[in-house]
Image (cartoon, helix red, strand yellow):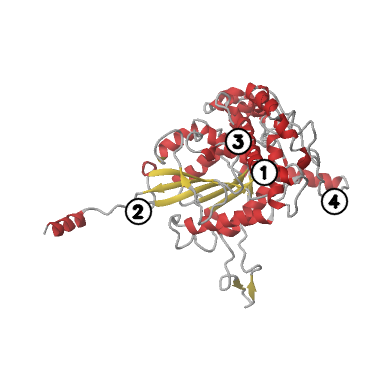
Amino acid sequence: MLSQALLLACAALPLAQAETVLGLYIFHRHGDRTAKATPPANLTDFGYQEVFTSGTWFRDQYISSTAASRISGIEPDLVKLGQLSASAPLDNVLQSSAIGFLSGLYPPVGPGMDTQTLRNGTVVTAPLDGFQLIPVEIVTSGGNSEDSAWLQGSSGCAAATTSSNEYFYTPDYMDLLNSTMDFYQGLLPMINGTFNTTTATYKNAYTIFDLLNVASIHNTTNFNASDLLTPPTFSQLRTLADHHEWNLAYNASSPVRAIQGATLAAQILQALNATVTAPHSAPKLNVQFGAYGSFTSFFGLAGLLPVAPDFYGVADYASAMVFELVTNASTPTPAPQDIAVRFRFHNGTTSNASVPAAYPLFGQPATLLPWADFAANMTAFAVGSQAQWCAACGNTTGVCAPASASSGSDSNSTGSGSGSSGQDTGASSGGGGMSNAVAGVVGAMVTLAVVLLAEGLVLVLGGLRLVSKNRLAASPAPSATGVKA
């Protein structure tokens, strides 16, 4: 009798509403590539497989008709371009990785969906079994980042470069430079084709690790003195590289050092806000590919270092940050107060065997944050306009010339500007620093179009012609001083 009464009472209660995923923002690292020390870097077949595998998992989790956490209203098979925004810097490895990921996210449609009948009755079959063509937009930050050994080499931010260079004068750096000298010199039999006694030091910790990491993956025969690369030696190489790059990417007392993470935060916030405020017209899924420096600096800004060891140092190939926009409301257009954000991260290739885990952001205990709290915390360090970027970076030329003159009136400037040195790179770095939070990547495309038009006029009027560029041979690793490290 008691059990029957309990069942009747439970039946009278309202059913709990299942969680609905409204939108998603994925920031993804590229797949396996060739070494930075032997530019130009290229995505390998293994790297292609990594990003394709990751894209397939995200399809199975968020897009397909049987997905466990399917994004509300998203097309499961035939991509609807208005629902998806894909972007990457103008970089061989990152653009190729984005394309590889997207081919797993929306694979070829296959027989039955790969044909079209014209008015005259002709049946046209799409190439490659209906391979889906998804444009990858160009973001202004991070161009050629995989050919640059210097973490700030593609940021274009003068103050960030100055801030990162300050690490080379710290007691921590000097102590490690001296204490690891014998360790790095002992590696020369393996790396003397690229490094010498001057450059084989902690100053080039990441590029040395990167070179030997690539060799350990791809060299089918033993390379010079490969027996020296023991597991303890490789572990120390990785630990030193992680420490080196963390200190170049983030410093709590100099926020501008993390400019890449600050601009990424603005891009994430802009995209998710569009999904919240204009759910019927904004993309439901945003995918951006970028370099490890953006991961590291964002981890620092978001207070993730104490949360898990994976947030310290360099994220592995094909790593992914995921921001889920979710609600428990039953209405198709929930109010902002009914929306929350969950952050997930996976270090390395995402697959059914290893999936992204949820982590708390901003030092808070919960992994699910109300939209207003998430937006407020992101806004606290996001650099979300060209004027903010110019003010924070201290750039005064190029597109920053007019912005810097009026930057004092920008009331939304963040703390990232506090580390500005006033130094100017002298290049059009201001234009390559970030996407405008209002115009998004559109501004980048307009700028690119103007540049291409100008180059076209030079080619036509100057009687010039385009020629192919020979692949660069292996060259000595760049020094940490000046532009690269």
What is the three-letter code of the residue carrying label 2?
Answer: Ala
Amino acid type indicated by mark 1: Thr
Classify mark 2: helix, strand or loop: loop
Mark 3 to mark 1 CA distance (whole Å) = 34 Å
- Give how far apart the Cα atoms at labels 2 and 3 are: 36 Å
Residue found at the very far left of the displayed protein: 1
Q: Which residue is mark 3?
A: 260
Q: Which residue is mark 4?
A: 467
Camera-near label (4 vs 2) is 2
**Mark 1 — residue?**
230
Above/below status of 149 relative to 75: above
Is residue 394 visible to the viewer in this orientation of the structure? no
Give 50 or 413, whichever is nearer the viewer. Answer: 50
Q: Is residue 113 above or below residue 328?
A: below
Identify the residue at image location x=61%, y=54%: 50
Tell which tag, 3 or 1, sits nearer the viewer: 1
Which residue does the numbered mark 2 point to in the structure image?
18
Total marks in image? 4
Q: Nearer the viewer, mark 4 or mark 1?
A: 1
Q: Mark 1 and mark 2: span between their CA atoms? A: 50 Å
Callout 4: SS: loop
**Within-10-Å neighbours for mark 4: few <14, some 14–19, many 20+:** few
Where in the figure is residue 260, as x and y percent of width and height?
60, 35
Mark 1 Cα shell of 10 Å, populated few (<14), some (14-19), many (≥20): few
Which of marks 2 and 4 precedes in the sequence? 2
Crowd band around label 2 with a 10 angstrom C-alpha radius: few (<14), some (14–19), many (20+): few
- For the C terminus, give its image quadrant: top right
Q: Secondary structure at mark 3?
A: helix
The type of residue carrying mark 4 is Val
Q: Earlier in the sequence, mark 3 or mark 1?
A: 1
- Residue 198 x, y percent position in the rendering: 79, 30
